[in-house]
């Protein structure tokens, strides 16, 4: 047994692992790296998370003889075999063997082979003090340990936990054991409590068999920087928010990933319809971090164009039960025409230019609870896709009395969109119209989609239904033209795309033309289209003369555009906003006039 000369000036961190079913954390530090140690608090290396709370700590920088330890609430027991030897059970650290982890050189507590006689078994208990509030479910005991460098004897430590006892003869559970490090480093280890209790205690045992001055496998060990910490970190929730949900698919299924440092106790969803009262439902843990559940509602309790607001809430399994939630999300319930699962490349094709006319009957649209309104977006349920981009995509609409079609219509159209369109995702994808189309019950709706495909890619397939004489189209490679500019014959297609509609049943812009009077209240309408790219329209009304301010803000609350900043007479107003100079994302617009103020959210997608 000799004094070890330490010369290493580096430190290593060993990746956490699991031993005997218990969480085990192991970090090694060179005891001579004083510049490193002195730049950190004794306990900052345990966990630098702001969610970690140190509930108890002892740096052993003061006196550590038996009386001093007992005065601080420690309990010391000798349960070795045979009579006690010449050394105390636990005593002040000896710098002649090695210096402390930090603080004064003798600032640690030690034990050695001379605590027993002959070659008896060593079993020295250091029971930690009880702490205010007791031991919590996810409390962790951390401490640094070290043996002499290159010590040939394998000293060992056992870590114990009890909820009811303080003496070794009581009911203790071994929560881990290890051989003390002999590489010259102080090594930090952590052990988790097994059950919460107001009387819970940890104990550190220096425990070696066949040892003592005449035995083997024992030498000298040190314990330093003991602490008990708990983690109050909040759960982490990952979820892709809904934007639109077809009523046909209601109740929608929530799917999210939820994880946490201490496990997850429960996950639930709080939601409401429009301005109604909030209700909630629990999610089920399907596997590991996956949680799922259906909205606790049925199709009779929601309507087309309903806005559904929801947030996901998760609670940690720790005794403190920290809770976190997502932001408040919103989606709109829309209606669809067609529910077939046939794949069709109409109205799109990935390898040619094209034009497609599609007829949807008034009876099909009005069955969705809508009798009139502005169509501000249409959507397709994409089944198969390779990322694509169309140039000169045009969407046209008109109302007709025909109940079938067998040719293209070349007149009577309203141009609803003229621009590029790109998509990379499957499922329902909506195309916002720059010019909404007003539809009324009794009118059949004819929709035309034409485009220029700049290069050949693979097919772009949508879900369709078998409907005869309702689709007429062609796909052709037109090197110098596109499907919107070439007048050519097509063919009847028996597969009509399932179509989703976003319709504003009462849109102020549709009635502004007929309103010459004074509104009876302030109003700020939802922009349309929303989603938009790059143009959208914002309607508002003011019932009395006054100064009006209408501004656009980004998601961080920074003002990016002023649309109105002047005196206005009472009346109805509509203003356009072009977002071409701004990136895709969520934006807000705020109206202020007299005592009135309102804010609404809009989404720019490019």
Image (tube, helix red, strand yellow):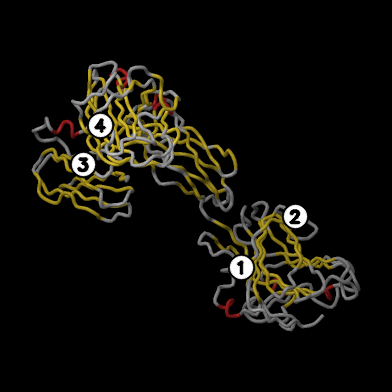
Residue identified by numbered label 1: 57
Using the image, tell me which numbered label, if any, was put on residue 538: 3
- The residue located at (34%, 35%) in the rendering is 477
Residue 578: x percent and y percent? 22, 47
Q: How many marks?
A: 4
Q: CA distance from mark 2 to mark 4?
A: 83 Å
> Helix, strand, or loop for circle 1?
strand
Q: Is residue 416 above or below residue 18?
A: above
User: Dot 2: few (<14), some (14–19), or many (≥20) neighbours within 10 Å?
Assistant: some
Tell me if label 4 and label 1 are in contact, CB under 8 Å. Answer: no
Marks 3 and 2, how far apart at CA: 68 Å
Sequence-first tag of 1 and 2: 1
Q: Secondary structure at mark 4?
A: loop
Q: Specify whether residue 504 is in view.
A: yes
Q: CA distance from mark 1 to mark 3?
A: 60 Å
Tell me the mark number nearer the camera, choosing from 3 and 2: 3
The residue labelled by disc 2 is 173
Compared to residue 543, the image places residue 115 above or below, namely: below
In the rendered view, does 532 fall on the left or right side of 166? Answer: left
Q: Secondary structure at mark 2?
A: strand
- Distance (Cα) linking label 4 and label 3: 36 Å
Labelled pair 2, 4 in contact (Cβ < 8 Å): no
Q: Nearer the viewer, mark 4 or mark 3?
A: 4
| Of callouts 3 and 2, the N-terminal one | 2
């Amino acid at each position: 047994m000799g004094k070890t000369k330490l010369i290493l000036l580096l430190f290593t961190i060993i990746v956490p692992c699991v031993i005997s079913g218990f969480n085990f954390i192991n970090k090694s530090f060179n005891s001579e790296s004083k510049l490193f140690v002195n730049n950190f608090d004794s306990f900052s290396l345990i966990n630098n998370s702001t969610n970690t709370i140190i509930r108890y700590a002892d740096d052993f920088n003061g006196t550590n003889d038996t009386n001093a330890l007992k005065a601080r609430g420690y309990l010391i027991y000798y349960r070795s075999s045979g009579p006690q030897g010449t050394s105390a059970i636990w005593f002040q650290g000896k710098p002649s063997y090695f210096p402390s982890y930090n603080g004064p050189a003798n600032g640690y507590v030690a034990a050695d082979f001379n605590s027993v006689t002959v070659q008896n078994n060593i079993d020295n208990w250091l029971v930690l003090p009880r702490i205010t509030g007791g031991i919590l479910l996810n409390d962790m005991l951390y401490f640094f340990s070290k043996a002499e460098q290159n010590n040939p004897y394998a000293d060992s430590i056992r870590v114990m936990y009890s909820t009811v006892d303080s003496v070794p003869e009581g009911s203790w559970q071994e929560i881990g054991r290890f051989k003390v490090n002999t590489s010259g480093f102080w090594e930090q280890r952590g052990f988790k409590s097994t059950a919460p209790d107001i009387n819970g205690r940890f104990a550190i045992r220096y425990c070696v068999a066949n040892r003592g001055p005449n035995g083997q496998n024992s030498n000298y060990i040190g314990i330093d920087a003991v602490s008990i910490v708990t983690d109050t970190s909040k759960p982490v929730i990952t979820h892709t928010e809904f934007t639109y949900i077809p009523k046909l698919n209601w109740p929608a299924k929530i799917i999210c990933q939820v994880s946490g440092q201490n496990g997850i106790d429960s996950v639930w969803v709080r939601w409401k319809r429009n301005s109604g009262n909030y209700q909630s439902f629990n999610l089920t843990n399907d596997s590991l971090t996956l949680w799922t559940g259906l909205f606790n509602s049925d199709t009779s309790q929601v309507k087309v164009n309903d806005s559904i607001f929801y947030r996901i809430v998760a609670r940690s399994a720790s005794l403190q039960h920290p809770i976190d939630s997502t932001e408040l999300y919103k989606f709109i319930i829309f209606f669809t025409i067609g529910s077939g699962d046939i794949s069709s490349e109409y109205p799109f094709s990935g390898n040619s230019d094209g034009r497609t006319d599609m007829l949807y009957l008034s009876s099909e649209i009005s069955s969705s609870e809508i009798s009139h309104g502005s169509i501000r977006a249409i959507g397709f349920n994409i089944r198969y896709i390779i990322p694509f981009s169309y140039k000169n995509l045009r969407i046209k609409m008109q109302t007709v009395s025909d109940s079938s079609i067998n040719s293209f219509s070349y007149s009577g159209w309203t141009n609803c969109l003229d621009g590029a369109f790109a998509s990379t995702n499957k499922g329902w994808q909506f195309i916002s119209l720059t010019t909404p189309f007003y539809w009324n019950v009794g009118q059949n709706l004819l929709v035309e989609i034409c485009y220029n495909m700049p290069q050949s890619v693979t097919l772009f397939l949508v879900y369709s239904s078998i409907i005869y004489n309702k689709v007429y189209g062609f796909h052709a490679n037109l090197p110098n033209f596109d499907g919107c500019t070439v007048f050519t014959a097509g063919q009847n297609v028996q597969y009509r795309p399932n179509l989703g509609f976003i319709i504003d049943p009462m849109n102020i812009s549709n009635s502004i033309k007929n309103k010459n009077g004074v509104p009876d209240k302030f109003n700020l309408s939802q922009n349309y289209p929303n989603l938009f790219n790059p143009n959208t329209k914002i309607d508002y009304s003011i019932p009395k003369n006054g100064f009006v301010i209408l501004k656009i803000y980004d998601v961080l609350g920074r003002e990016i555009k002023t649309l109105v900043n002047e005196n206005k007479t009472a009346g109805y107003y509509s203003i356009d906003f072009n977002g071409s100079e701004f990136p895709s994302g969520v934006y807000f617009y705020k109206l202020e006039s007299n005592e009135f103020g309102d804010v609404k959210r809009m989404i720019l997608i490019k």
